[in-house]
């Protein structure tokens, strides 16, 4: 008889090896079973304990009584003309998040969300305009990878084992949810789960300095910093978090980050906004800022969204900016925009956020007000 209601059951999808061992020990089971369970759940994709053939019948029954394996649910799939997938994923409380899969010739990148909405409200990002509801749980974070692996391998055999990289560049600020993000990274890295190397997982942050330190102690994944501006006045405007963690302190934290791994660099993301941060003077200021910082720069053409006042820099300006940085010895690439015909590009992910910040409402009022003023 099943006594526990589904709500009270523990969701094993979100347990990394340490947590799974502790859970099994709590049941009076041998901790080595943790590896078997993780393999069934993440490598084989099972959700039914009854199918886990190397576990004893009694363990399978006890697990079914107290635990569950519950992934979030894809409610909508969009495939762009360039092959990019975007999934709208519903969580158990009705909130929706988005994840994106970007296939390329030699790799496939899954872009995942870490929060429902985002607390940070960067001015050029449409996720920010949705407001914020809550942090995702580990099960919801790893659940995006779990789902993508399943969908891609059943949709198209060519895509079997298609996910080679994971980036935390979807909705939310991962460094404000490290308690849930770190166990998810542990699962991504683990050989009995997804076996991704530290170079193939990238955590992107708007610059939460204490989170950078915590992340570095807990894992050694790649780090990207959403820099976007070369001085505090401009960055305060574009990335309000800068008022709390200004550039000088941020650059010190960046120098510190890979100090024990001198061959690694932080990826500096820099969204190119026409007339705002894209002049040669800005490039020069960026070169000074990044002096002595182990950095590579990734220039991101701005992706538009409704009611934004920003515009994309033209390709010539972006190339000139790139050349200037390269001539100063800074490795600089330009991000190729993917999936923009299905609004799957950077900064376009919106999901369906039960906003607790009232930001959506204020944004609507601002737009109504400015259209009244125009009349
Ligand atoms: N909060 C984290 C994770 C989000 S990552 C962070 O700020 O890094 C999303 C990346 O896309 C960030 O570099 C973000 O600055 C960038 N981005 C946001 N809006 C964008 C837009 N409209 N066009 C292009 N890039 C954008």
Image: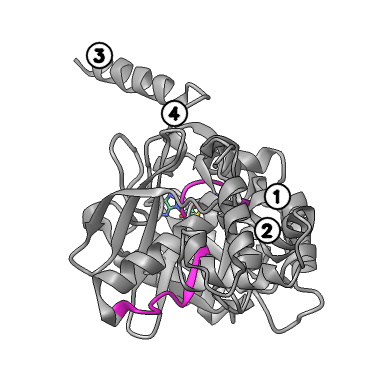
Q: Is residue 167 magenta?
A: yes
Could you tell which of marks 1 and 3 lies nearer the N-terminus? 1
* Residue behind mark 2: 182
Mark 4 Cβ and ligand 1 under 8 Å apart? no
Residue at 49 percent across and 62 percent down: it is 50
Q: CA distance from mark 1 to mark 2?
A: 6 Å
Mark 3 Cβ and ligand 1 under 8 Å apart? no
Of helix, strand and loop, which one carries label 1? helix
Q: Position of residue 214 (x, y in %)?
A: 77, 56
Q: CA distance from mark 4 to mark 2?
A: 25 Å
Q: Quick one: quadrant of the N terminus?
A: top right
What is the crowding at mark 1: few (fewer than 14 residues within 10 Å), some, or many (at least 20)?
some
- Tell me the quarter of the picture where residue 365 sits: top left
* Residue behind mark 4: 354
Q: Are marks 3 and 4 in contact (CB under 8 Å)?
A: no
* Residue behind mark 1: 179
Mark 2 Cβ and ligand 1 under 8 Å apart? no
Q: Does 230 appear above or below 106?
A: above
Could you tell which of marks 4 and 1 lies nearer the N-terminus? 1
Q: Are marks 1 and 3 in contact (CB under 8 Å)?
A: no
Residue at 60 percent across and 37 percent down: it is 8
What is the crowding at mark 2: few (fewer than 14 residues within 10 Å), some, or many (at least 20)?
some
Q: Does 33 appear above or below 9?
A: below
* Residue behind mark 3: 372
Q: CA distance from mark 4 to mark 1?
A: 22 Å
């Amino acid at each position: 008889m099943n006594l526990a209601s589904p709500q009270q059951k523990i969701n094993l999808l979100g347990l990394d090896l340490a947590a799974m061992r502790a859970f099994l020990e709590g049941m009076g089971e041998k901790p080595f079973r943790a590896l078997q369970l993780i393999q069934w759940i993440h490598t084989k994709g099972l959700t039914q304990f009854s199918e886990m053939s190397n576990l004893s019948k009694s363990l399978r029954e006890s697990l079914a009584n107290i635990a569950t394996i519950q992934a979030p649910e894809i409610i909508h799939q969009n495939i762009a003309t360039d092959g990019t997938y975007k999934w709208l994923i519903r969580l158990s409380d009705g909130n929706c998040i988005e994840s994106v899969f970007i296939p390329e010739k030699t790799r496939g990148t899954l872009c995942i969300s870490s929060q429902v909405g985002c607390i940070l409200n960067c001015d050029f990002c449409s996720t920010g305009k949705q407001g914020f509801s809550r942090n995702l749980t580990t099960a919801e974070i790893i659940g995006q990878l779990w789902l993508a692996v399943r969908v891609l391998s059943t949709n198209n055999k060519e895509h079997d084992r298609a996910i080679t990289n994971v980036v935390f560049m979807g909705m939310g600020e991962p460094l404000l949810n490290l308690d849930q993000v770190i166990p998810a990274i542990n699962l991504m890295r683990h050989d009995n789960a997804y076996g991704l190397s530290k170079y193939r997982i990238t955590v992107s942050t708007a610059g939460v300095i204490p989170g950078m330190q915590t992340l570095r102690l807990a894992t050694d994944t790649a780090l990207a910093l959403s820099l976007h501006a070369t001085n505090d006045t401009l960055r305060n405007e574009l990335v309000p978090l800068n008022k709390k963690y200004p550039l000088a302190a941020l650059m010190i934290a960046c120098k510190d980050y890979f100090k024990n791994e001198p061959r690694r660099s932080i990826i500096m993301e820099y969204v190119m906004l026409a007339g705002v941060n894209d002049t040669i003077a800005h490039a020069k200021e960026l070169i000074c800022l990044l002096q002595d910082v182990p950095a590579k720069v990734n220039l991101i053409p701005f992706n538009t969204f409704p009611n934004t006042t920003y515009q994309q820099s033209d390709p010539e300006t972006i190339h000139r900016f790139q050349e200037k940085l390269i001539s100063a010895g800074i490795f600089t690439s330009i991000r190729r925009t993917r999936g923009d015909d299905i609004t799957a590009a950077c900064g376009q992910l919106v999901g369906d956020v039960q906003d607790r910040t009232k930001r959506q409402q204020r944004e609507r009022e601002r737009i109504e007000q400015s259209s009244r003023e125009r009349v």
